[in-house]
Image (cartoon, rainbow, N blue to C red):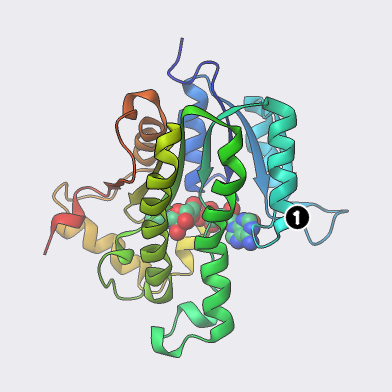
Amino acid sequence: MGLFTGKKGVIFGIANERSIAWAITQALHAEGAEMGFTHLPDKDPVRPKNENKVRKLVDPIGAKFVIPCDVQKDGDLDAAFQKTSETFGKIDFVLHSVAFAPPQDLTGPVYAASREGFKTAMDISVYSLMAMTGRARPLLNAGGSILTLTYLGGEKVIPGYNLMGLCKSALESAVEYMASELGPAGIRVNALSAGPVKTISASGVGDFKKMLTLYETFAPLRRNITEEEVGKAAMFLMSSYASGISGETLHVDSGYHIMG
Ligand code: NDP
Protein backbone atom coordinates (compact mmCIF):
# COMPACT_ATOMS: atom_id res chain seq x y z
CA MET A 1 0.00 0.00 0.00
CA GLY A 2 1.62 3.27 -1.15
CA LEU A 3 0.91 6.87 -0.20
CA PHE A 4 -0.82 7.35 -3.57
CA THR A 5 -2.64 4.03 -3.83
CA GLY A 6 -6.09 4.82 -5.30
CA LYS A 7 -5.03 8.42 -6.07
CA LYS A 8 -5.31 9.81 -9.59
CA GLY A 9 -3.94 12.84 -11.33
CA VAL A 10 -2.63 14.56 -14.41
CA ILE A 11 0.94 15.59 -15.25
CA PHE A 12 1.91 18.53 -17.48
CA GLY A 13 5.54 19.04 -18.51
CA ILE A 14 7.40 15.86 -19.41
CA ALA A 15 9.59 16.51 -22.46
CA ASN A 16 12.15 13.73 -21.94
CA GLU A 17 13.88 11.59 -19.31
CA ARG A 18 15.67 14.64 -17.87
CA SER A 19 12.47 16.60 -17.21
CA ILE A 20 11.74 17.37 -13.57
CA ALA A 21 8.15 16.22 -14.21
CA TRP A 22 9.51 12.76 -15.07
CA ALA A 23 11.41 12.54 -11.77
CA ILE A 24 8.22 13.51 -9.93
CA THR A 25 6.16 11.04 -11.98
CA GLN A 26 8.51 8.22 -10.97
CA ALA A 27 8.18 9.12 -7.28
CA LEU A 28 4.37 9.23 -7.59
CA HIS A 29 4.32 5.93 -9.50
CA ALA A 30 6.44 4.27 -6.80
CA GLU A 31 3.70 5.20 -4.31
CA GLY A 32 0.92 3.76 -6.47
CA ALA A 33 -0.48 6.84 -8.28
CA GLU A 34 -2.51 6.46 -11.49
CA MET A 35 -1.70 9.19 -14.00
CA GLY A 36 -2.57 10.74 -17.34
CA PHE A 37 -0.02 12.81 -19.28
CA THR A 38 0.10 15.67 -21.75
CA HIS A 39 2.80 16.79 -24.18
CA LEU A 40 3.35 19.77 -26.46
CA PRO A 41 1.49 19.02 -29.74
CA ASP A 42 3.68 17.70 -32.56
CA LYS A 43 4.17 19.85 -35.66
CA ASP A 44 4.41 16.74 -37.86
CA PRO A 45 1.69 14.24 -36.88
CA VAL A 46 3.27 11.60 -39.16
CA ARG A 47 6.45 11.68 -37.06
CA PRO A 48 5.19 12.64 -33.58
CA LYS A 49 8.52 13.24 -31.83
CA ASN A 50 7.11 14.80 -28.65
CA GLU A 51 4.43 12.15 -28.21
CA ASN A 52 6.91 9.32 -28.84
CA LYS A 53 9.40 10.69 -26.30
CA VAL A 54 6.72 10.89 -23.61
CA ARG A 55 5.13 7.53 -24.48
CA LYS A 56 8.51 5.78 -24.29
CA LEU A 57 8.69 6.84 -20.63
CA VAL A 58 5.09 6.65 -19.43
CA ASP A 59 3.58 3.71 -21.33
CA PRO A 60 5.72 1.20 -19.37
CA ILE A 61 4.40 2.61 -16.08
CA GLY A 62 0.77 2.26 -17.13
CA ALA A 63 -0.17 5.78 -18.30
CA LYS A 64 -3.97 6.11 -18.40
CA PHE A 65 -3.76 8.56 -21.32
CA VAL A 66 -1.21 10.58 -23.30
CA ILE A 67 -2.65 13.57 -25.14
CA PRO A 68 -1.37 16.77 -26.77
CA CYS A 69 -1.87 20.08 -24.97
CA ASP A 70 -0.44 23.47 -25.82
CA VAL A 71 -1.07 25.43 -22.62
CA GLN A 72 -1.44 28.62 -24.67
CA LYS A 73 -4.64 27.22 -26.19
CA ASP A 74 -7.84 27.22 -24.15
CA GLY A 75 -9.30 24.49 -26.38
CA ASP A 76 -6.33 22.20 -25.65
CA LEU A 77 -6.67 22.78 -21.90
CA ASP A 78 -10.44 22.12 -22.07
CA ALA A 79 -9.75 18.87 -23.94
CA ALA A 80 -7.06 17.80 -21.45
CA PHE A 81 -9.37 18.22 -18.46
CA GLN A 82 -12.29 16.66 -20.37
CA LYS A 83 -10.11 13.60 -20.98
CA THR A 84 -9.04 13.65 -17.31
CA SER A 85 -12.67 13.74 -16.20
CA GLU A 86 -13.76 10.96 -18.61
CA THR A 87 -10.84 8.76 -17.54
CA PHE A 88 -10.83 9.26 -13.78
CA GLY A 89 -14.00 11.08 -12.77
CA LYS A 90 -12.55 12.82 -9.73
CA ILE A 91 -8.79 13.42 -9.30
CA ASP A 92 -6.38 14.05 -6.43
CA PHE A 93 -3.50 16.01 -7.96
CA VAL A 94 -2.27 18.15 -10.83
CA LEU A 95 1.41 18.73 -11.57
CA HIS A 96 2.30 21.92 -13.50
CA SER A 97 5.93 21.68 -14.64
CA VAL A 98 5.82 24.00 -17.62
CA ALA A 99 7.76 27.16 -18.48
CA PHE A 100 9.04 28.93 -21.57
CA ALA A 101 10.41 32.30 -22.64
CA PRO A 102 11.55 33.13 -26.19
CA PRO A 103 15.38 32.79 -26.16
CA GLN A 104 15.96 36.30 -27.53
CA ASP A 105 13.93 37.76 -24.65
CA LEU A 106 15.39 35.49 -21.98
CA THR A 107 19.07 35.99 -22.69
CA GLY A 108 19.09 39.79 -22.63
CA PRO A 109 18.45 42.24 -19.79
CA VAL A 110 14.86 42.45 -18.54
CA TYR A 111 14.50 46.03 -19.81
CA ALA A 112 15.19 44.85 -23.36
CA ALA A 113 12.54 42.11 -23.44
CA SER A 114 9.94 42.61 -26.15
CA ARG A 115 6.25 43.08 -25.35
CA GLU A 116 5.40 39.89 -27.25
CA GLY A 117 8.19 37.92 -25.54
CA PHE A 118 6.97 39.08 -22.13
CA LYS A 119 3.39 38.08 -22.96
CA THR A 120 4.47 34.66 -24.24
CA ALA A 121 6.65 33.97 -21.20
CA MET A 122 3.94 35.02 -18.74
CA ASP A 123 1.25 33.14 -20.67
CA ILE A 124 3.11 29.80 -20.78
CA SER A 125 4.87 30.04 -17.42
CA VAL A 126 2.22 31.70 -15.21
CA TYR A 127 -1.24 32.02 -16.76
CA SER A 128 -1.17 28.29 -17.61
CA LEU A 129 -1.19 27.45 -13.88
CA MET A 130 -4.22 29.67 -13.34
CA ALA A 131 -6.00 28.21 -16.40
CA MET A 132 -5.28 24.65 -15.21
CA THR A 133 -6.40 25.39 -11.66
CA GLY A 134 -9.76 26.77 -12.82
CA ARG A 135 -10.40 23.66 -14.89
CA ALA A 136 -9.10 21.23 -12.27
CA ARG A 137 -11.04 22.70 -9.33
CA PRO A 138 -14.38 20.94 -10.03
CA LEU A 139 -12.56 17.63 -10.54
CA LEU A 140 -10.36 17.73 -7.45
CA ASN A 141 -11.36 15.76 -4.37
CA ALA A 142 -11.14 17.47 -0.97
CA GLY A 143 -7.58 16.80 0.18
CA GLY A 144 -6.36 17.17 -3.41
CA SER A 145 -3.40 19.29 -4.39
CA ILE A 146 -1.82 21.28 -7.19
CA LEU A 147 1.94 21.68 -7.44
CA THR A 148 4.06 23.93 -9.65
CA LEU A 149 7.81 24.33 -10.10
CA THR A 150 9.64 27.56 -9.40
CA TYR A 151 13.18 28.88 -8.89
CA LEU A 152 14.94 31.21 -6.45
CA GLY A 153 15.28 33.77 -9.28
CA GLY A 154 11.64 34.66 -8.56
CA GLU A 155 12.59 35.87 -5.05
CA LYS A 156 16.04 37.38 -5.61
CA VAL A 157 18.02 38.62 -8.56
CA ILE A 158 19.98 35.71 -10.04
CA PRO A 159 22.26 36.79 -12.91
CA GLY A 160 21.17 35.15 -16.17
CA TYR A 161 17.66 34.25 -14.98
CA ASN A 162 16.31 37.58 -16.27
CA LEU A 163 12.74 37.49 -17.64
CA MET A 164 12.02 34.07 -16.13
CA GLY A 165 12.64 35.63 -12.69
CA LEU A 166 9.67 37.94 -13.24
CA CYS A 167 7.58 34.96 -14.34
CA LYS A 168 8.50 32.96 -11.24
CA SER A 169 7.64 35.92 -8.95
CA ALA A 170 4.21 36.11 -10.54
CA LEU A 171 3.85 32.32 -10.39
CA GLU A 172 4.60 32.25 -6.65
CA SER A 173 2.09 35.04 -6.08
CA ALA A 174 -0.53 33.09 -8.08
CA VAL A 175 0.18 30.06 -5.87
CA GLU A 176 -0.59 32.13 -2.76
CA TYR A 177 -3.79 33.68 -4.11
CA MET A 178 -5.08 30.36 -5.43
CA ALA A 179 -4.16 28.55 -2.21
CA SER A 180 -6.39 31.04 -0.40
CA GLU A 181 -9.18 30.64 -2.98
CA LEU A 182 -9.18 26.82 -3.04
CA GLY A 183 -8.38 26.23 0.62
CA PRO A 184 -12.03 26.35 1.77
CA ALA A 185 -12.70 23.37 -0.55
CA GLY A 186 -9.84 21.46 1.11
CA ILE A 187 -7.56 21.82 -1.93
CA ARG A 188 -3.91 22.77 -1.47
CA VAL A 189 -1.75 24.76 -3.91
CA ASN A 190 2.03 24.78 -3.49
CA ALA A 191 5.28 25.46 -5.31
CA LEU A 192 8.56 23.58 -5.17
CA SER A 193 11.62 25.77 -5.70
CA ALA A 194 14.27 23.48 -7.16
CA GLY A 195 18.00 24.08 -7.35
CA PRO A 196 19.52 23.92 -10.84
CA VAL A 197 18.97 20.64 -12.72
CA LYS A 198 20.31 19.97 -16.25
CA THR A 199 17.18 19.89 -18.46
CA ILE A 200 16.16 21.33 -21.85
CA SER A 201 14.61 24.39 -20.17
CA ALA A 202 17.73 24.96 -18.06
CA SER A 203 19.92 25.03 -21.19
CA GLY A 204 18.11 28.26 -22.20
CA VAL A 205 19.20 30.02 -19.01
CA GLY A 206 22.41 32.03 -19.38
CA ASP A 207 25.15 31.29 -16.81
CA PHE A 208 23.52 27.93 -15.98
CA LYS A 209 26.91 26.17 -15.67
CA LYS A 210 28.08 28.91 -13.31
CA MET A 211 24.97 28.32 -11.20
CA LEU A 212 25.90 24.65 -10.78
CA THR A 213 29.39 25.63 -9.59
CA LEU A 214 27.97 28.28 -7.27
CA TYR A 215 25.73 25.72 -5.54
CA GLU A 216 28.59 23.23 -5.19
CA THR A 217 30.75 25.92 -3.64
CA PHE A 218 28.35 27.83 -1.38
CA ALA A 219 25.17 25.80 -0.70
CA PRO A 220 25.06 24.48 2.88
CA LEU A 221 25.20 20.91 1.54
CA ARG A 222 28.09 21.87 -0.83
CA ARG A 223 26.54 20.02 -3.78
CA ASN A 224 23.79 20.22 -6.34
CA ILE A 225 20.49 18.48 -5.79
CA THR A 226 19.51 15.31 -7.63
CA GLU A 227 16.32 14.96 -9.67
CA GLU A 228 15.37 12.09 -7.38
CA GLU A 229 15.42 14.49 -4.41
CA VAL A 230 13.10 16.88 -6.24
CA GLY A 231 10.83 13.95 -7.18
CA LYS A 232 10.51 12.71 -3.61
CA ALA A 233 9.96 16.17 -2.09
CA ALA A 234 7.32 16.96 -4.71
CA MET A 235 5.59 13.66 -4.02
CA PHE A 236 5.58 14.51 -0.30
CA LEU A 237 4.07 17.97 -0.95
CA MET A 238 1.32 16.43 -3.08
CA SER A 239 0.63 13.65 -0.56
CA SER A 240 -1.56 13.43 2.53
CA TYR A 241 1.64 13.73 4.64
CA ALA A 242 1.58 17.43 3.63
CA SER A 243 -2.13 17.86 4.39
CA GLY A 244 -1.44 20.97 6.50
CA ILE A 245 0.74 22.71 3.91
CA SER A 246 -0.70 25.18 1.40
CA GLY A 247 0.46 28.40 -0.28
CA GLU A 248 4.03 27.28 0.43
CA THR A 249 7.18 27.50 -1.67
CA LEU A 250 9.39 24.63 -0.55
CA HIS A 251 13.06 25.00 -1.43
CA VAL A 252 14.79 21.81 -2.54
CA ASP A 253 18.15 23.35 -3.33
CA SER A 254 20.78 21.99 -0.91
CA GLY A 255 19.89 24.96 1.31
CA TYR A 256 21.29 27.57 -1.11
CA HIS A 257 18.35 29.98 -0.60
CA ILE A 258 19.51 30.89 2.94
CA MET A 259 22.87 32.22 1.76
CA GLY A 260 23.19 36.01 1.69
P1 NDP B 1 11.76 20.68 -19.38
O1 NDP B 1 12.16 21.43 -20.62
O2 NDP B 1 12.05 19.25 -19.34
O3 NDP B 1 10.21 20.93 -19.05
C1 NDP B 1 9.51 22.07 -19.46
C2 NDP B 1 8.24 21.60 -20.10
O4 NDP B 1 7.41 22.71 -20.51
C3 NDP B 1 8.51 20.78 -21.37
O5 NDP B 1 7.78 19.58 -21.31
C4 NDP B 1 7.97 21.69 -22.47
O6 NDP B 1 7.55 20.99 -23.61
C5 NDP B 1 6.81 22.32 -21.73
N1 NDP B 1 6.22 23.43 -22.46
C6 NDP B 1 6.82 24.56 -22.92
N2 NDP B 1 5.92 25.32 -23.58
C7 NDP B 1 4.73 24.65 -23.53
C8 NDP B 1 3.42 24.91 -24.03
N3 NDP B 1 3.13 26.02 -24.73
N4 NDP B 1 2.44 23.99 -23.80
C9 NDP B 1 2.71 22.86 -23.11
N5 NDP B 1 3.92 22.56 -22.62
C10 NDP B 1 4.92 23.45 -22.83
O7 NDP B 1 12.51 21.46 -18.20
P2 NDP B 1 12.40 21.37 -16.61
O8 NDP B 1 11.98 20.03 -16.21
O9 NDP B 1 13.68 21.95 -16.12
O10 NDP B 1 11.27 22.45 -16.28
C11 NDP B 1 10.08 22.15 -15.56
C12 NDP B 1 9.78 23.28 -14.59
O11 NDP B 1 10.78 23.32 -13.59
C13 NDP B 1 9.76 24.67 -15.23
O12 NDP B 1 8.73 25.44 -14.64
C14 NDP B 1 11.11 25.23 -14.82
O13 NDP B 1 11.13 26.66 -14.81
C15 NDP B 1 11.21 24.66 -13.43
N6 NDP B 1 12.53 24.67 -12.81
C16 NDP B 1 13.61 24.12 -13.46
C17 NDP B 1 14.86 24.15 -12.87
C18 NDP B 1 16.05 23.59 -13.56
O14 NDP B 1 17.18 23.89 -13.17
N7 NDP B 1 15.88 22.74 -14.57
C19 NDP B 1 15.07 24.77 -11.54
C20 NDP B 1 13.87 25.27 -10.93
C21 NDP B 1 12.65 25.22 -11.55
P3 NDP B 1 8.59 20.81 -24.87
O15 NDP B 1 9.94 20.55 -24.34
O16 NDP B 1 8.03 19.69 -25.65
O17 NDP B 1 8.60 22.14 -25.55
Give the residue at the far top of this rendering: 1
**Residue 244 appears in the picture as rendered:** yes
Q: Residue 191 appears at what percent x and percent y? A: 38, 48
Quadrant housing residue 52: top right
Name the quarter where the C terminus is drawn: bottom left
Question: Which residue is nearer to you in this view: 148 or 178?
Answer: 178
Give the residue at the far right of this rendering: 46
Q: Residue 213 appears at what percent x and percent y? A: 25, 62
Quadrant housing residue 136: top right
Q: Is residue 244 above or below residue 50?
A: above
Q: How many marks?
A: 1
Q: Residue 100 appears at what percent x and percent y? A: 54, 66
Residue designated by label 1:
75
Quadrant housing residue 179: top left
Give the residue at the far bottom of this rendering: 112
Query: Which residue: 13% across, 59% down?
Result: 259
Q: Is residue 125 above or below residue 188?
A: below
* Disc 1 crowd, CA 10 A, few/some/many (<14, 14-19, 20+): few
**Residue 109 appears in the picture as rendered:** no
Q: Amino acid at mark 1?
A: Gly
Question: Which residue is nearer to you in this view: 244 or 67?
Answer: 244
